[in-house]
Amino acid sequence: MGTAYVIWTGVGGIGTVLIGIFLFGDSATFWRLFFIFLIIVGIVGLKFVH
């Protein structure tokens, strides 16, 4: 159950950031995209470890 919560929280956070970038013109700097990538890597890692 904890893994599912982390995955959906990450998906919601990433979705919110991407909507901000594409629809509202938020900045898409290297560091912002890099940390979004790290969240994705963490979610994938949790899925494979489980």
Image: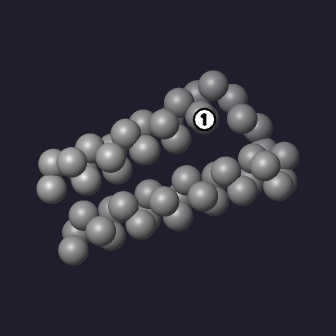
Question: Dot 1: few (<14), some (14–19), or many (≥20) neighbours within 10 Å?
Answer: few
* Residue located at (52% from left, 64% from top): 12
Q: Amino acid at mark 1?
A: Arg
Left or right, 26 with reference to 3: right
Horizontally, residue 16 falls left or right of residue 6, namely right
**Quarter of the rendering occupied by the C terminus:** bottom left
Residue 26 against residue 37 in the figure, above or below: below
Q: Position of residue 24 (x, y in %)?
A: 84, 54
Q: Identify the residue at horizontal 43%, vertical 44% (top origin).
A: 40
Q: Is 5 or 50 nearer to us in this picture?
A: 50
Where residue 6 appears, x then y in whole percent? 33, 62
Q: Residue at x 76, y 38 (%)?
A: 27
Residue 32, located in which quarter of the rendered image?
A: top right
Quadrant containing the N terminus is bottom left
Left/right of residue 21 with respect to residue 14 in the rendered view: right
- Horizontal and vertical percent for residue 28? 72, 35
Q: Position of residue 39 (x, y in %)?
A: 42, 44
Residue 23: quadrant of the picture? bottom right
Q: Is residue 11 above or below residue 4?
A: above
Tell me the residue that label 1 is attached to.
Answer: 32
